[in-house]
Amino acid sequence: MKKLVTLIALSLALSAPAWAATKTVTLFVPGMICETCPITIKKALNKVQGVEKTEVTFEKKEVVVTFDDAKTKVEALLAATKNAGYPSTVRK
């Protein structure tokens, strides 16, 4: 019986989705200078595993990204925009 309880506890502890949280970050993208830039940025961010939603505001030059923090990190989002040609920073 102890082995069964231990096995169940261990399997629950190792299941990452139970510990995951949805987070939101706002990225400032100063290089967003034309009406087609948001499309490129959104495509790049949506390719990152764990990204659930992206909202690009051209006028503010910002992107609000909702993501699963068990699957990706803010650094990966920053890298995705940079690799697409649009370096970004976290807006606080």
Image (tube, rainbow, N blue to C red):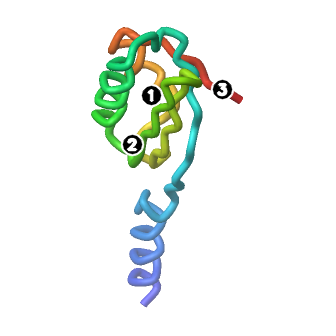
Residue 39 position in % (x across, y down): 32, 26
Question: Mark 3 and mark 1 in contact (Cβ < 8 Å)?
Answer: no
Nearer the viewer's eye, disc 3 or disc 2?
A: 3
Residue to which mark 3 is pinned = 91
51 in relation to 6, above or below: above
Instruction: Name the residue nearer the viewer: 6 or 52.
Output: 52
Label whose residue precedes the other's in the sequence (3 or 2):
2
Q: Residue at the location (32% across, 40% down)? A: 49
What type is the residue that disc 2 sits on?
Val
Q: Foreground residue, 65 or 16? A: 65
Q: For the residues marked 1 and 3, what is the alpha-carbon distance in whole angstroms?
A: 13 Å
Along the line of sight, the residue nearer the viewer: 9 or 70: 70
Quadrant of the image occupied by residue 14: bottom left
**Rendered position, 16 above or below 74:** below
Question: Of helix, strand and loop, which one carries label 1?
Answer: helix
Which residue does the image show at 56% across and 47% down from the upper left? 23
N-terminal label among 1 and 3: 1
Three-letter code for the amino acid on which mark 1 is drawn: Leu
Disc nearest the viewer among 1 and 3: 3
Return the residue found at the far bottom. 1
Residue 84, position as x, y percentages in the image? 33, 14
Marks 2 and 1 in Cβ contact (< 8 Å)? yes
Q: Quadrant of the C terminus?
A: top right
- Residue 83 in picture, x, y percent from top left: 35, 13
Q: Check disc 1 and report the residue beneath it.
A: 77
In the image, 32 versus 47, the foreground residue is: 32
